Amino acid sequence: MVLLRDPLDDNVIPIVEELQRRLPPVDTNFLGQGEDEDGIGVQTEAQTGESIEFPFEFRALEVALEGICSFLDARTRELETAAYPALDELTSMISSRNLDRVRKLKSAMTRLTNRVLKVRDELEQLLDDDDDMADLYLSRKFSFASSPSNDGEDLTWSPASPTIESKISRASRATPFSTHGENDVEELEMLLEAYFMQIEATSNKLTTLREYIDDTEDYINIQLDNHRNQLIQLELFLLSGTVSLSVYSLVAAIFGMNIPYPWNNDHGYVFKWVVILAAIVSATIFMSITTYSRYKGLVGS
């Protein structure tokens, strides 16, 4: 029997169906044979004529790990499909809509990364502790507990799981039996390593996506800095022009005062020279400020 926390959840239903497909109902008469059998879910090659299967708990564990890893990998592919075009569109056109879209994708990636890392850390913790892996051999414990006369004997089975068969070398597959001591966790270790590699590949995909997002953010920041510098240059030119016009307006304001000038009568040509000289001085001030800014590298060439 396998206990599931929420078997009616949409994400758990596929695992339930796979468990029902891979784990047929156990014959109670078969369980009552005790000393004639090696344990729950383990049959001899003479009875089946086939390769000996994994114990019941390992088959259930494999279904759960396969469902979890497949679910996370599918979510990662969906995220990649949506994220890469959104990031490319953002680099070509920076807008509020594109920025909000990328923000939501980045939040979803962070949540998914946390889930993937959680699964990977749990598998890594199990692989690093042989005692924890030995505790998962429920069939072995049941066999030793129910058959005291079999103390010291070894349980034998070969990996019938398609996932494990793809990870074991040809030499190992050529030998249908393997000897297991009480602390031998080779089969479980191979099972966990197979799915650890799968979840590690998913984690690498998310890491690559995060790096791509970081590169995109750096590129956008560079673009924004460039636009900011252009605005500063424009502001500098406008301020220079304002100062020049202020000088020109100052001359006009001075001569516009109601002050008698002795040379103001019968000297109309003076007005022309005052206007020309004021314009030249204003232009010189503007060019001086611009040249100095270019010389100091404050504006581009």
Image: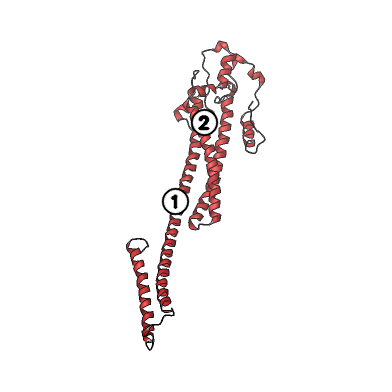
> Image point 46% across, 54% down: which residue?
220
Q: Nearer the viewer, residue 25 or 109?
A: 109
Identify residue for label 2: 122
> Image point 49% across, 28% down: which residue?
125
Question: Image quadrant of residue 29?
Answer: top right
Q: Nearer the viewer, residue 77 or 37?
A: 77
Q: Position of residue 112 (x, y in %)?
A: 54, 41
> Image point 53% across, 34% down: which residue?
119
| Nearer-N-terminus badge (2/1) | 2
Answer above or below: position of 254 versus 77.
Answer: below
Numbered disc total: 2
- Residue type at the position of mark 1: Asp
> Image point 45% across, 56% down: which residue?
224
Q: Nearer the viewer, residue 262 or 111?
A: 262
Q: Position of residue 36 (x, y in %)?
A: 59, 15
Label 2 packing within 10 angstroms: few (<14), some (14-19), many (20+): few
Q: Secondary structure at mark 1?
A: helix
Answer above or below: position of 21 versus 147.
Answer: below
Q: Residue furthest bottom?
A: 266
Answer above or below: position of 60 versus 242.
Answer: above
Give me the C-alpha separation between circle 2 and circle 1. Answer: 34 Å
Q: Nearer the viewer, residue 299 or 208?
A: 299
Q: Is residue 188 visible?
A: yes
Q: Mark 2 or 1, which is nearer the eye?
A: 1
**What kind of colouring is applied to the model shown?**
secondary structure
Question: Image quadrant of residue 256?
Answer: bottom left
- Residue type at the position of mark 2: Glu
Q: Position of residue 69 (x, y in %)?
A: 54, 36
Label 1 packing within 10 angstroms: few (<14), some (14-19), many (20+): few
In the rendered image, which quarter contains the C terminus? bottom left
Q: Which mark is residue 218?
A: 1
